[in-house]
Image (cartoon, grey):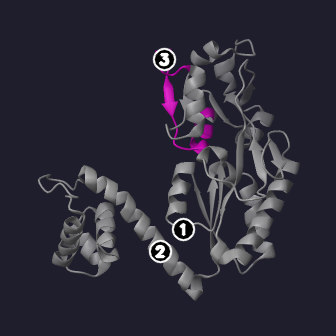
Amino acid sequence: MNFKQMEAFYWLCQLHSYRRVAERLSLTQPAVSARINALEEDLNVQLIERDSQHFRLTEHGQQVAEYAEMFANLHEAMSSRLDERRQRHLAVGMVSMVTTSWGILMRDMVARAAPNVLLDIHSGSNRDLRRLLRAGVLDLAFLTDEADLSRVPNSFTVQYDVGWVGHPDLLRDLKQPLQTKTLRQLPIILYPPSSPLMQVLSRMLHENRARPNVRHVGNSLATISEMVRRGYGISAVALSQVEEDIISGRLELIETTETIAPLDICCVHLNRARKTQVQQIFEIAETAAREWCETHPRFLTFKKGPAS
């Protein structure tokens, strides 16, 4: 097994066409087929359902596809590091709560303090960013504690308060604080199963029981927040995301008898191969986080060191 075989398989998974892969890699179609066949022989498994009318991976193929993506990401990261023209780029992973809060200030501070550094921001879920970490793509990464990764020694922590919000029209005539059984009667916007908040809400709302009202699912905090604004239902969100909506009265902060623990975000990765440059950006990130929390204290708390 070699990189060229994995590369061909990766692009076949993306493009679903031997012809398009051949064009992408400047090869002939027989050459692409030969690389795929050689990979199957080396692994001693069938990767593609050849009896299917459409492109389809076997169960083994789906497993290998994940590793092929990691190979491709790692190759790109390695090439970037070795290319002097791209040494200015630093890849920073952020969960969406950071991207829409102190990540904004961090970006602006880096532009002023380190104008020769170009930040490539990767915003996603814990799961998305963990995959990029495994592939060696990221130089810094800020994730929630639920990612189950060891934090960087002396990392600061930003604590995000989580609470229920909804459009005022959905909450009219309801006496607060609301009990959990009352929350269950309302339309609710939930998170994907992989979200740490979904695990909390599922237990809180007893989602394994019959659902008395509609349940929507949003694929990101930004999407869920917008769905709440549009009146699809109520949801539990990082309240800093909707602070302006609460202040303006566009959304209502719901008082409940059962609270949700805040989310703690910290740095879980610093690329030691670029220690000096990365440390500078980390220090700027800490300053940005502290200043943002000082100017947005209602739903955010900055802590130096582990959260208590």
For residue 248, side relative to residue 275 (left or right): right
Residue pointed to by mark 3 = 211
- Earlier residue among tags 2 and 1: 2
Residue extending furthest toward the bottom:
84
Magenta part of the protein: which range? 206-228
Q: Is residue 46 above or below residue 187?
A: below
Query: Residue at left 75%, top 71%?
Result: 279
Question: Is 155 or 198 nearer to us in this picture?
Answer: 155
Residue at the disc numbered 1: 137
Q: Secondary structure at mark 2?
A: helix
Task: Please identify the residue farthest to the right as the structure is shown.
Answer: 294
Q: Which mark lies nearer to you, 3 or 2?
A: 2
Would you name the residue on which mark 2 appears? 76
Q: CA distance from mark 3 to mark 2?
A: 46 Å
- Could you tell me residue 51's position as x and y percent? 11, 53
Question: Mark 2 touching mark 1, by CB under 8 A?
Answer: yes
Viewer-nearest residue: 158 or 101: 158
Callout 1, which amino acid? Val
Asked if residue 295 lies left or right of residue 183, the reply is right
- Would you say residue 125 is visible in this rendering? no
Residue 255 vs residue 66, the one in the foreground: 66
Residue 221 belongs to magenta span: yes
